[in-house]
Image: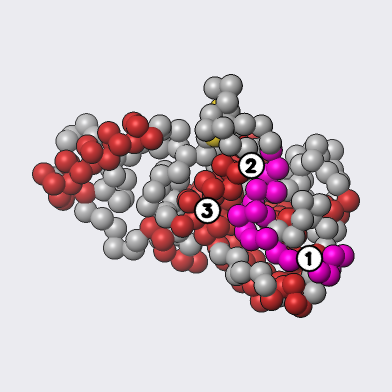
Amino acid sequence: LGDLVFNDRGELYIDRRFVTKEDMKTIKAIERWIARWFPRQTRKRKVPREHAGGAGLPVFCGFEDDRYQQHDRLIARLVAEFNADKARWCGGTPAQAARIPNLTAALVKAHMVEETGGNDARSLSAWAMDPLQVNVPGDWGAEKELVGLARSAKRNSGTLEGNVRAALMYLSRKGFSSAARPAAERPKGYFDGWKEALRRYNGRRDRTDTNRYYSAEYADKILERASNPDLFVPIEIKLATGKGADGPE
């Protein structure tokens, strides 16, 4: 095994972000064989993935590099603030806020990975300042100003905390309607769930190679990654034309 390199979880050290599901089956079979015959090289970490990051956040399979854990403490703090005062963040009434399920830090981190988890220069720049891609000049509306953003002519403006804070407000408002207006503007409106909020946050209606809307597959991948850190969920979504789409939009 001298030529093989392992990560600190006993897995083969490879870039798994764009590995196909079929290839991943082969990789897992090899890892099981190595684990059986060479247990010392595959000794697992004592801390499971779901709590291995900063502030007890998960470390997602395929995204173990230190940069993916850089925002963990910020995420944990802002999620706690959101859950403590949902009405203010969603711009809703107390009754509306009471029906919003708690936001989880795992979901927010999984969302960041989906938006800017690529390894190209554009994704790396976005991860550092606007990892949820809420502050993008070409995707602007008055609702962005209502979550504290100022219109800019260039990407990745503002501050990291300001952008993440705005993104969580924006996401929660998407749970009430695609318009992302303050929820109290429609007092009888109700929160449709985090899955629907994620789908509306992306909003793309082009078809994937599974004949689903891009935005629907996007939401499912985020939730799947958040719920099972041990499962590798690639960020690439293949379009019906055969072309892939990844990185910040």
Residue at 55% over, 57% down:
107
Sequence-first disc among 3 and 2: 2
From the viewer's side, name the closer residue of 4 and 81.
Answer: 81
In this image, 36 relative to 71: left or right?
left
Label 2 packing within 10 angstroms: few (<14), some (14-19), many (20+): many
Q: Secondary structure at mark 1?
A: loop
Query: Magenta segment range?
Result: 184-204
In this image, 118 relative to 86: left or right?
left
Residue 215 bears which disc, if any?
2
Asked if residue 190 lies in the magenta stretch, the reply is yes
Sequence-first disc among 3 and 1: 1
**Which residue, given by chain and number where applicable, does mark 1 sit on?**
189
Asked if residue 203 lies in the magenta stretch, the reply is yes
Q: To which quarter of the image does residue 248 belong? A: top right
Give the alpha-carbon distance from disc 3 to disc 2, as whole Å. 13 Å
Q: Amino acid at mark 2?
A: Ser
**Measured from the top left, where is residue 207 in percent x and y?**
62, 31
Q: Secondary structure at mark 2?
A: helix
In this image, 45 relative to 2: left or right?
right
From the viewer's side, name the closer residue of 161 and 145.
Answer: 145
Q: Amino acid at mark 3?
A: Leu
**Which residue, given by chain and number where applicable, does mark 3 sit on?**
223
Sequence-first disc among 1 and 2: 1
